[in-house]
Image (cartoon, grey):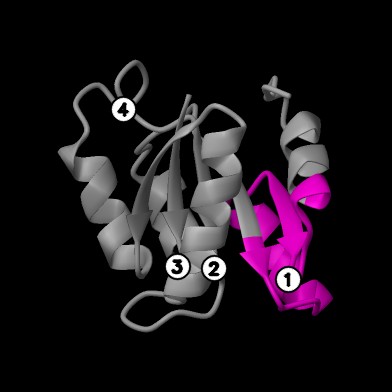
Amino acid sequence: MRALIVDDSSFIREYLRQNLQRMGMVCEEAGNGQEALDAFGREAGFGEGGFDLMLLDVNMPVMNGLECVRILREKKLGPETRVMMVTTEADSSYIGRALEYGADEFLMKPFTAEALREKLAILGFEIAA
């Protein structure tokens, strides 16, 4: 399984990458929404060779997570990619817009490895122990 971690914090990207790799995922990283869309554009096939999961922060420079997920879904990039918003934004308007734009799940910062594992299970990912 392949994951794209999108966050402007290198600390958060590293923490997520370490946890996901321990769970058996191969990870790529992006620092903002535009870099994430560029990563999808580099992937051939968008399904077979693309990303199974994208973990996406809301507040980032250049392009925020809400705009990124909206464009991702509108352009049908990675239509099978599950999108989990990983954010400090607990405001229901952010959550509602993200779900409307095509996000599949939310993980609130700060979070534990166990909380990440539980959210991945909700999304249907079988995680290595």
N-term mark: 2 or 1: 2
Tell me the tag on residue 12: 2
Determine which of the numbered discs, if any, sits on residue 67 in the image. Answer: 3
Residue 50 shows up from this direction: yes
Mark earlier in primary sequence (3, 4): 4
Three-letter amino acid code at disc 1?
A: Lys
Residue 96 drawn in magenta: yes
- Residue in view at x 72 percent, y 48 percent: 105
State the image quarter where residue 107 is shown.
Answer: bottom right
Q: In the picture provided, is 38 more to the left or to the right than 73?
A: left
Q: Amino acid at mark 3?
A: Glu
Q: Residue furthest bottom?
A: 61
Give residue 123's position: percent from left, percent from top: 72, 32
The residues bearing labels 4 and 1 have C-alpha atoms spaced at a distance of 28 Å
* Residue 45 percent location from the top left of the image: 25, 21
Asked if 98 appears above or below 60 in the picture, the reply is above
**Distance from Cα at disc 3 to Cα at disc 4:** 19 Å
Nearest-to-viewer mark from 3 and 1: 1
Residue at 48% x, 61% y: name it. Answer: 14
Pick whichever of labels 4 and 1 is earlier in the sequence.
Answer: 4
The answer to whether marks 2 and 1 mark residues whose Cβ atoms lie closer than 8 Å is yes
Residue 27 figure quarter: top left
**Circle 1 residues within 10 Å: few <14, some 14–19, many ≥20:** few
Under mark 4, the amino acid is Phe
Residue name at image x 39 percent, y 55 percent: 71
- Residue 109 marker: 1
Q: Is residue 55 left or right of residue 100?
A: left
Q: Which residue is mark 4?
A: 46
Give the class, few, some or many, for how many residues have Cα within 10 Å of label 4's Cα (few <14, many ≥20). some
Tell me which segment is drawn in magenta. 86-115
